[in-house]
Each structure stands twice: as structure tokens, then as C-alpha cells.
Image (cartoon, grey):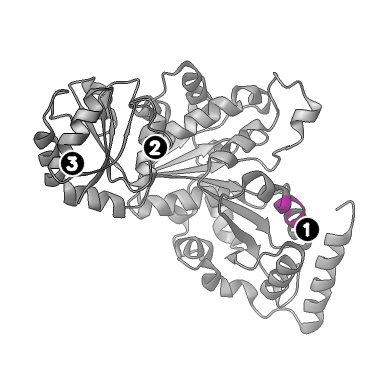
């Protein structure tokens, strides 16, 4: 039995619901066309009108995340339906048996859609000190493209935007700032994002890049409301949206700034709140781990219950001695209660080559240990080369003491 939501004006909604029940369709809710959100639980499809006022980016994104099929009734706007990949083969006054026939005929397709991965927004965050946020965001986007997902890479860093420079793109392209302006005017859609984005051809497919602002002084253009709206449209436009953000989210801005004015790091807060998952990045050295622990608690408070995946980058024995991995695990567990950690190795040669050619690391160093670690479902297992035995047990204990001192120092 197929479960549906009927979202039509009355009395048409009640009449169609009664006809669908006669045809064996389970009607879980009857609501107005503008009262669909939040979506009722247990539905496989929603029947509504094919109008721009109803088929908003927010509704389509919510249906994509929940795996709910949209069946629009009426001719509506063909361009709008085409933009979201919808078809309208039924008139607005279609009988219940006609609607039921379409639902039953497309039942297997609806089931496959439920099983497919939903569209997501992933935010890559890390504390101050350049732990490698942009490098990881680029490589993660490339690997999602390799997996066959349409992926967008967004530079929402208002402090040190760098994706365009790292990828050899012009920093004068419209990018996310132009998308935010159009979002505020209500004119941003998938077609407009395709026009604004720069297509980057990689060895595994093409990647859509929305570059950041070319000067940090332009930060007011990425306001919280604008960026949130733009990311919601991105969620409909691309299957995976990877957002590179700055380190500061300044949760106390409301107490220090004019409430009606723009906030310096509002873009970071907006991206983190809109994300379906946050990749929290730390650098594998005493200072990097100390900074991460201090910021992680505030990050968790601001974004709960959004899942946070903790990744430790640049793992190497130099700053911490032989057992760098074990020391970091114990420190994160003791001071932050973090037990699930992914490690990425420090591949300086591959990183330098990527910088030299301004290309993703997978294009210029496909055998890099860093590339293999990001690609692997369990990257920590691919980073064993980073713990080569060029230290000693005495160096290991000295590294542990440095980690403890760095965390305890008040000015670190």
C-alpha cells in the first residue's frame, strides 16, 4: 500500500482523499497546499498543485531528504516542473482512480528513490591555525564526484577565502556572493546556480565551484539569511554540497554588535546551522589539538544535534613522537569525550605538487596517501605510513607532555 499526503485546497482535498482510499491508497494526512512543512511521517508521496507558490525550494529539499515523491496536479509552470525534474501528466481535476493508477505504476520508482542517498550539505570547519580545511574540502568534493554524485563546492570563508586560488580559478567570477544576492531577491534557482558556478574538470568528472569573495572586506555580502537561502537552493540543485567555512563563528556577536546590522562571521554560523553533517578538522600537533578542544565544545553547543565527524589532519610523528595517533586519541577522549576519530596523513610532496599546479591533489598525485585516506571508508587505516618509526619511546612521552601543557596553557 502506498502512503500519500494530499495537499490541495478544500473541498478538493477531502474529495480526492476519499476517492484514493477507495482505490486502496493510504492517505496519511490532508493539509492545505501551503501547510506541508514539516512533512508528516510515513508518507511516500505528496499530491499538490503545480504552482510556484507551493513548489518552493524548501519544500522540494525537504521531500528529497525524506525520499518523498512529489506528484503535481495541473499544467502549472512547465519551466518550474522541469527545473525540479517533475512531470505533470494529470489535470487538476483528475479523478481518484487516475491519480491512484499513476501512483501504483510509479511505485517501484518511488521505492528506489527512498533507497537512494538524499541530498546533503556538508560543512568543513576547523579552528584557527590553517589545519587544512580548504584542502580537505576540495578532496572530499572530488571523491564525492568520483562516487557519481553531482557535487558543488562552495567557498563561504569570509576571513581567508582560498578555493579559487587553490584550483586555479579566477577570483573575480560571480560565485557565492552573486548567488546570495539573487537569493535575497528570490530569483535563485538551479539554472541560475549553474550559470554562476565555474565548472572544474577533474580526472573523475566535473565539479561545480562557487568561489568565495575576492576580498575579506566584502564579508557583509554573505549575510546569514542570504547564505542559508542559497544553501537550501544548492541542496536541491546538487546531490552533495561541500562548504568551506572560516574558523570563527562568534556566538556572542549578538551581545557586541548592533542586532540589526551584519555580523562578521555570520556566514560560518549560517553554514554550520544549515549543514546535514559537519566535518570538524584538527591539526595533529599540540597547538592544533589544544585549539580544537577549546572550540569543539562551543561548536557542539551551537549545532546540536547535527552530526559532527572529527578528523585529525597532518598526522606525523614529528611533533608528538612515535605514538602520535594514540596520544591524540587519549587526549581527545580525556578532555573532550571524543572517541570516534578519523586520521589523515601528512603528505607534503603531494600537497606541494597540488599547490604548484593549482589542481586537486587527486589529479596531480593520485597515489598520495592523503588521497587514499580521504577515499577510504575508514581513512584512519590508510594513514599508517604517517606513524613511521623514526621516533623513540622517550619522544613519545615528551609529545604527550607537550599535548597536556598546550591544553592547560591559558594563552595558547
Query: Where are the magenta residues, as a range?
Result: 292-297
Q: CA distance from mark 2 to mark 1?
A: 38 Å
Check disc 2 and report the residue beneath it: 61
Q: Earlier in the sequence, mark 3 or mark 2?
A: 3
How packed mark 3 is, by other alpha carbons closer than 10 Å (few <14, some 14-19, many 20 or more), is: some
Q: CA distance from mark 1 to mark 3?
A: 60 Å
Check disc 3 and report the residue beneath it: 21
In the displayed structure, does residue 294 sit left or right of residue 91?
right
Q: Quadrant of residue 207?
A: top left
**Furthest residue toward right:** 410
Quick one: 49 or 328, which is closer to the camera? 49
Q: Magenta part mainly helix, strand or loop?
A: helix
Does residue 389 show up? yes
x and y percentages locating residue 50 in the rendered image = 25, 24
For mark 2, give the secondary structure: helix
Q: CA distance from mark 3 to mark 2?
A: 28 Å
Q: Earlier in the sequence, mark 2 or mark 1?
A: 2
For mark 3, give the secondary structure: helix
Q: Quadrant of residue 325?
A: bottom right
Amino acid at each position: 500500500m502506498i502512503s500519500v499526503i494530499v495537499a490541495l485546497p478544500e473541498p478538493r482535498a477531502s474529495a480526492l482523499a476519499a476517492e484514493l482510499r477507495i482505490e486502496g491508497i493510504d492517505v496519511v494526512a490532508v493539509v492545505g497546499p501551503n501547510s506541508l512543512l514539516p512533512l508528516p511521517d510515513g508518507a511516500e508521496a505528496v499530491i499538490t498543485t503545480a504552482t510556484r507558490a507551493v513548489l518552493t525550494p524548501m519544500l522540494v529539499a525537504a521531500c528529497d531528504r525524506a525520499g518523498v515523491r512529489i506528484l503535481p496536479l495541473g499544467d502549472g509552470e512547465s519551466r518550474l516542473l522541469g527545473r525540479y525534474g517533475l512531470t505533470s501528466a494529470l489535470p487538476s481535476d483528475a479523478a481518484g482512480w487516475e491519480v491512484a493508477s499513476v501512483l501504483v505504476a510509479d511505485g517501484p520508482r518511488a521505492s528506489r528513490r527512498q533507497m537512494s542517498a538524499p541530498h546533503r550539505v556538508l560543512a568543513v570547519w576547523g579552528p584557527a591555525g590553517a589545519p587544512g580545511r580548504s584542502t580537505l574540502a576540495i578532496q572530499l568534493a572530488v571523491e564525492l564526484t568520483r562516487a557519481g554524485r553531482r557535487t558543488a563546492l562552495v567557498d563561504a570563508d569570509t576571513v581567508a577565502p582560498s578555493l579559487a586560488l587553490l584550483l586555479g580559478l579566477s577570483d573575480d567570477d560571480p560565485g557565492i556572493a552573486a548567488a546570495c544576492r539573487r537569493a535575497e531577491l528570490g530569483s535563485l534557482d538551479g539554472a541560475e546556480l549553474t550559470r554562476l558556478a565555474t565548472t572544474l574538470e577533474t580526472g573523475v568528472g566535473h565539479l561545480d565551484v562557487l568561489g568565495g569573495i575576492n576580498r575579506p572586506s566584502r564579508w557583509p555580502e554573505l549575510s546569514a539569511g542570504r547564505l542559508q537561502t542559497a544553501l537550501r537552493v544548492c541542496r536541491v540543485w546538487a546531490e552533495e554540497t561541500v562548504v568551506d567555512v572560516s574558523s570563527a563563528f562568534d556566538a556572542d556577536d549578538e551581545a557586541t554588535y548592533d542586532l540589526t546590522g551584519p555580523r562578521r562571521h555570520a556566514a560560518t554560523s549560517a553554514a554550520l546551522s544549515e549543514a546535514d553533517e559537519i566535518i570538524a578538522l584538527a591539526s595533529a600537533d599540540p597547538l592544533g589539538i589544544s585549539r580544537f578542544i577549546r572550540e569543539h565544545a562551543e561548536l557542539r553547543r551551537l549545532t546540536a544535534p547535527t552530526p559532527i565527524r572529527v578528523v585529525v589532519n597532518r598526522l606525523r610523528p614529528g611533533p608528538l613522537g612515535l605514538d602520535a595517533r594514540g596520544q591524540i586519541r587519549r587526549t581527545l577522549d580525556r578532555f573532550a569525550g571524543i572517541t570516534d576519530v578519523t586520521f589523515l596523513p601528512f603528505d607534503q610532496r603531494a600537497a606541494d605538487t597540488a599547490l604548484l599546479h593549482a589542481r586537486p591533489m587527486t589529479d596531480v598525485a593520485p597515489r598520495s596517501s592523503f588521497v587514499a585516506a580521504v577515499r577510504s571508508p575508514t581513512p584512519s587505516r590508510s594513514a599508517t605510513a604517517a606513524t613511521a618509526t623514526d621516533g623513540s619511546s622517550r619522544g613519545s612521552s615528551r609529545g604527550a607532555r607537550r599535548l597536556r601543557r598546550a591544553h592547560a596553557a591559558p594563552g595558547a
